[in-house]
């Protein structure tokens, strides 16, 4: 066996010649003890660590193509380990992990041995690229619309994601040349009004936060990369779909008030009830009203449902007789409407009833966070930041009479009044303003930053930052200049302003807007109607009906009756999405004013409609009216 010195010399020579693949193969064949020795060696260990990231990812891809899933799982796991700041094992062996629980109390601080001395992945000559399998942009895997559904826990109710359907080109064809963008540019594309993607769905998928700004999770997804591929974004949104919408059937023995008086006995006999859980709604509830003892699991209960409903069989012509209708005029109205839709005596419709939301009842008592006020606050902050960008280049060269502390306080006052507590500046802003590197404003070198400890003095402060000078310098810069001071003094004596950090919404005593929030309230009818249209089709019904009769029977208030009108309108929106909006008269009819069980909207499943649902599915969301906050920001 060759001496360890000879091994390192051999590996170093291969790396220097650009033969890193051969070097890695040699490394793999070494005994574990020698591998550890190589791992902690400067230069050689870094080069092998960098190579291993791509190597195991490449092997995983090959294994998957060969259907070697077990092998693929192992390689993907190793690749994931390798992807965090090169390889955690290498950093740990070099002492960069700091003190662990097993360390003795006498150890005051970690003692890293190898601070950064070079830029990342520049450890070998340029020709290393010839030897390493560099990652390629994988062509986007376009999938049929029916594959883009939310897993609602109901296999028969795969409601579709409109955002993902956009990416896959199922409507509003996305530019085929767009394959990778920065997270910010992806957000601009997805929120473009012309693309008709509901902001509520983008909030549910953690593309946007509650302020309709780019979500921190999406930014984190791109850590270490400037851009995200279309496939990467689609994978991200697919992950966020998990548990986002859940539809649960109420067990037969736990139906809510099953023996209440019904307008139609068939509804009572065939009634089913479902509870809908929406991430971002329902969790805020504190009161328990309906389904108090219903628990599917500790996190999904009747007490945190967003909305619930009932559905039952309704044969419009089964008992339709003149002696059942008090007014002959109403009888003729109903008769004509049902004939216009060609409803037959044997036709069995699913009828939606008892749609209620304890979430909304509580939200109405506490009130949603006022979008208009929040929009105005955001508008003030954005206007201030726009002013800062325009004035800073002038201030940067004004060394004779720079902004005083008092001047800065006055300028900052307006944004502080709307809740701004923190100001920041980006490295690129310094470079743009001064024409010099932001690093000139730092009081520490990358090596000194590398050695900095956290507040408790138990580990390195920047242990999770990539181990290279640029990343360390940027992390330190942001920590140094993200604080409550609204200005920054440059080395030439000039004082410039910092950008205001948008304040987080104060939800004290308020409900944050949920994914189905529209204008000033949540449209809790949207999800049940969409789910039940899909369920009625899947279960072989001839059509679906929704009307307020049962709500009126149970003594519901005017606000609930009005919500049923929203539900009826939702049917037309579904037809529009399926490209059948012009078939409205052939597919739907509406009866009003008879004060009977027949009032409401009827949708009949024609062969054309069935084919459209089968091919396109039904979206979980449909773009509603413009949210006030978005309209105001658009005007800025």
Image (spheres, rainbow, N blue to C red):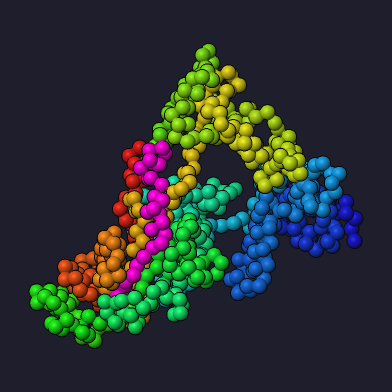
Image-based side of 295 in relation to 351, left or right: right
Residue 111: image location, x then y, percent: 81, 42
Say if 249 sits above or below 483 in the image. Answer: below
Report if residue 354 lies within the magenta region.
Answer: yes
Q: Nearer the viewer, residue 281 or 342?
A: 281
Q: Residue furthest bottom?
A: 346
- Residue 464 appearing in the image: yes
**Residue 321 horizontal side relative to residue 420, left or right:** left
Specify the segment rendered in magenta: 349-378
Q: Please report the residue visible at 34 percent of the width from the left and 50 percent of the height from the top.
A: 520
Quadrant in the picture for the C terminus: top left
Query: Does residue 391 appear to the left or right of 314 in the view shown?
Result: right
- 340 and 308: which is toward the camera: 308
Q: Is there any visible trace of residue 113 in the rendered image?
A: no
Number of numbered labels in the structure image? 0
Residue visible at 85% across and 49% down?
A: 104
The spot of residue 155 in percent (x, y) is: 45, 75
Q: In the picture, residue 390 is in which quadrant?
A: top left
Instruction: Reply yes or no: does residue 610 show up in magenta.
Output: no
Q: Is residue 392 above or below residue 266?
A: above
Residue lying at 58% horizontally and 34% vertically, measured from the top left:
482
Tell me residue 378's x, y (percent).
42, 39
């Amino acid at each position: 066996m060759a001496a360890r010195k000879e091994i390192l010399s051999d590996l170093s020579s291969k790396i220097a010649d650009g033969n890193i693949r051969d070097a890695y193969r040699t490394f793999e064949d070494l005994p574990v003890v020698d591998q550890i020795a190589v791992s902690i060696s400067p230069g050689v260990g870094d080069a092998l660590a960098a190579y291993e990231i791509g190597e195991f990812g490449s092997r995983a891809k090959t294994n998957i193509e060969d259907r070697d899933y077990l092998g693929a799982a192992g390689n993907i796991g190793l690749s994931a380990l390798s992807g965090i700041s090169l390889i955690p094992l290498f950093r740990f062996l070099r002492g960069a992990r700091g003190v662990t629980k097993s360390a003795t109390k006498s150890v005051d601080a970690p003692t890293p041995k190898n601070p950064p001395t070079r830029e990342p992945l520049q450890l070998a000559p340029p020709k290393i690229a010839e030897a390493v399998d560099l990652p390629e942009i994988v062509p986007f895997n376009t999938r049929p619309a029916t594959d883009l559904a939310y897993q609602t826990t109901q296999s028969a109710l795969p409601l579709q994601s409109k955002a993902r359907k956009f990416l896959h080109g199922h409507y509003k064809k996305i530019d085929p040349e767009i394959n990778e963008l920065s997270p910010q540019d992806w957000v601009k594309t997805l929120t473009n009004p012309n693309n008709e993607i509901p902001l509520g769905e983008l909030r549910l998928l953690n593309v946007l936060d509650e302020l309709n700004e780019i979500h921190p999770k999406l930014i984190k997804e791109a850590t270490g990369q400037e851009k995200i591929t279309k496939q990467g974004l689609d994978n991200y949104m697919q992950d966020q779909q998990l548990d986002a919408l859940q539809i649960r059937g109420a067990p037969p023995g736990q139906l809510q008030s099953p023996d209440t008086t019904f307008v139609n006995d068939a509804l009572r006999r065939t009634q089913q009830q479902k509870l809908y859980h929406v991430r971002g709604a329902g969790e805020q509830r504190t009161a328990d009203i309906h389904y108090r003892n219903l628990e599917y699991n500790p996190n999904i209960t009747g007490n945190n449902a967003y909305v619930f409903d009932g559905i039952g069989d309704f044969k419009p012509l089964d008992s339709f007789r003149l002696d059942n209708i008090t007014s002959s005029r109403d009888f003729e109205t109903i008769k004509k409407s049902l004939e216009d839709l060609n409803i037959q005596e044997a036709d069995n419709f699913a009828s939606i009833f008892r749609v209620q939301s304890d979430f909304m009842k509580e939200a109405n008592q506490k009130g949603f966070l006022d979008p208009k006020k929040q929009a105005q606050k955001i508008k003030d902050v954005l206007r201030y930041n726009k002013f800062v960008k325009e004035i800073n280049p002038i201030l940067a060269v004004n060394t004779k009479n720079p902004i005083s502390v008092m001047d800065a306080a006055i300028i900052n006052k307006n944004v502080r009044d709307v809740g701004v507590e923190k100001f920041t500046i980006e490295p690129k802003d310094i470079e743009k303003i001064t024409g010099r590197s932001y690093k000139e404003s730092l009081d520490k070198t990358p090596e000194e930053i590398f050695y900095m400890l956290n507040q408790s003095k138990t580990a390195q402060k920047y242990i999770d930052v990539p181990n290279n000078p640029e990343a360390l310098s940027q992390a330190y810069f942001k920590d140094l200049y993200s604080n409550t001071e609204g200005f920054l003094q440059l080395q030439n004596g000039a004082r410039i302003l910092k950008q205001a950090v948008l304040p987080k919404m104060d939800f004290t005593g308020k409900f944050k807007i949920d994914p189905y929030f529209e204008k000033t309230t949540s449209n809790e009818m949207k999800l049940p109607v969409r789910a039940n249209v899909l369920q009625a089709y899947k279960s072989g019904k001839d059509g679906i009906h929704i009307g307020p009769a049962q709500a009126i029977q149970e003594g519901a208030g005017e606000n609930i009756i009005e919500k049923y009108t929203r539900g009826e309108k939702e049917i037309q929106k579904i037809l529009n999405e399926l490209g059948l909006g012009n078939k409205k008269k052939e597919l739907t009819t509406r009866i009003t004013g008879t004060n009977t069980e027949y009032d409401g909207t009827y949708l009949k499943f024609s062969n054309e409609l069935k084919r459209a649902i089968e091919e396109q599915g039904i979206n979980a969301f449909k773009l509603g009216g413009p949210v006030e906050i978005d309209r105001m920001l658009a005007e800025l």
